[in-house]
Amino acid sequence: MSVPAVVVAAAGSAPMSEKRAATWLIGIVAILLAVSFTGNVGIVFALLIALMLTGIPVSIALGLTVLAFMFLLTRVPVEAVALKLFTGIERFEIMAIPFFILAGSFLTHGGVAKRMIAFATSIIGHFHGGLALAGIVACAMFALVCGSSVATVVAIGSIMLPAMVRQGYPMRFGAAVIVTAGSLGILMLPSIPKVIYAISTNTSIGALFVAGLIPGILLTVMLCSVTWYLAKKRGYPRMPKANWAQRWNTFRESLWGLMLVVIIIGGIYSGMFTATEAAAMSAVYAFWISVFVYKDLSLKEVPKVLLTAANLSAMLLYIITNAVLFSFLMSHENIPQAMADWILAKELGQVAFLACVNVVLLLAGNVMDPSSIILIFAPILHPAAMRLGIDSVHFGILIDANMEVGLCHPPVGLNLYVASGISKLSITDLTMAVLPWLATMVVFLVIVTYWPGLSTWLPKTLGMM
């Protein structure tokens, strides 16, 4: 199609659909109500919601909200907005995001996942539902070194789901296990949402990494317990019990991948490098073991892996850039402190406040991805949490646990869509299949919410808090 044709098509003479017209009407009414009753705070969020209702991506909606508000309702110079656009992403910690994405790409394509699966199967495969249990344990081990739920689902699910079907497991059961276990990718050691939260709230990235370890182990045990019970009840098959020689061989094969855990924790704890430098080391190490140790990735395939990682990094950094502008707007209008004052005036207390936070984040998980939720809500909720005496690291893990639940249910649960692509099941079938594990994750969320020591004990013990 030529350029003029594109312009004509974009302008179009076709009337606006009823659904789009209703959406715009709702947005305009919301803005007018905000202007009338709630002042600048209402205007900011009404603009954002109205733009999101029209189907505009969250990242663009954030940027347009800032520009519209700044240029129409304030006297902030254009130069200040442009300067903030560049200085906002110059923070050294942000470099951890593309490095962890690159490390995850190498690990996904480099044969690390299948060796972890073999090791997990040798340990736990002889129990009821052994192959499914091995899938959960393999997801946990891969999550220790990856930092992405979607990458965990792809790496483990693409190998485990066909194997489980061959062993006699229903595809619905296997896909549900991988969908929920894959969410461990953002809870265990490295995690892109943790980095984004740390940047948004000035929390220690190293402490957040370590803080997710014990909660991650607890969730792994809880998911395994549900899987074992259902597998035993339904009579799903068990694997032959591996001897110690087989276990040793599979452990030795997977050791190169698991050494990343030592690099991340050991390097940060010893002070050899920061969390960002640990991410860079992870990327280099993942490249080395994928290409030169396991040799599952050839040098010819490396440019494709680099391009995939670059595309995902660019997308996330674009979201972060617009979110930085949004944070600048909120700070300029003193919105976080105003929200904190309003929350404290209601005298909710820690218990009620944390319950409200969980409800808000779970609702947001229905319409936004984890990165967008953290970038919007963390700067707003964090000041109130600090003034109520809630630990910043504990609050970050609580937000992470909410994001895990959001990844596993529609309409924007990324893990569901990835697993649907692998298993060829519909989203509706998968949604029904994950319910037992999803209920378990909600119970886990309650535990994390009201047991702060679960998250803070290890980083405090290691002197990172």
Image: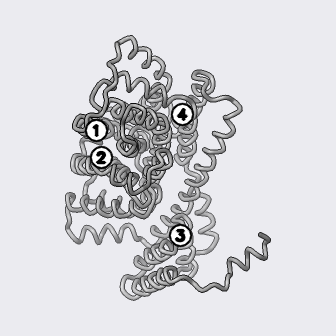
The residue beneath circle 3 is: 61
What's the CA distance linking mark 4 and mark 2? 26 Å
Tag 4's secondary structure? helix
Among the two numbered marks 1 and 3 on one chain, the one whose residue lies closer to the N terminus: 3
> Where residue 33 sits: x, y (%)?
40, 86
Label 1 SS:
helix
Q: How far apart are the alpha carbons under marks 4 and 3?
A: 33 Å
Camera sees residue 174: yes
Q: Which mark is residue 227?
A: 1
Q: Viewer-nearest of labels 1 and 3?
A: 1
Spot occupied by residue 81 in the image (x, y as percentages of width and height): 59, 68
Give the quarter of the figure containing the N terminus. bottom right
Near mark 3 (Cα within 10 A), the count class, few <14, some 14-19 or many ≥20, is many
**Front-most of 402 and 42?**
402
Amino acid carrying label 4: it is Leu
> Foreground residue, 340 or 173?
173
- Image point 33% across, 49% down: which residue? 434
Q: Are marks 4 and 2 in contact (CB under 8 Å)?
A: no
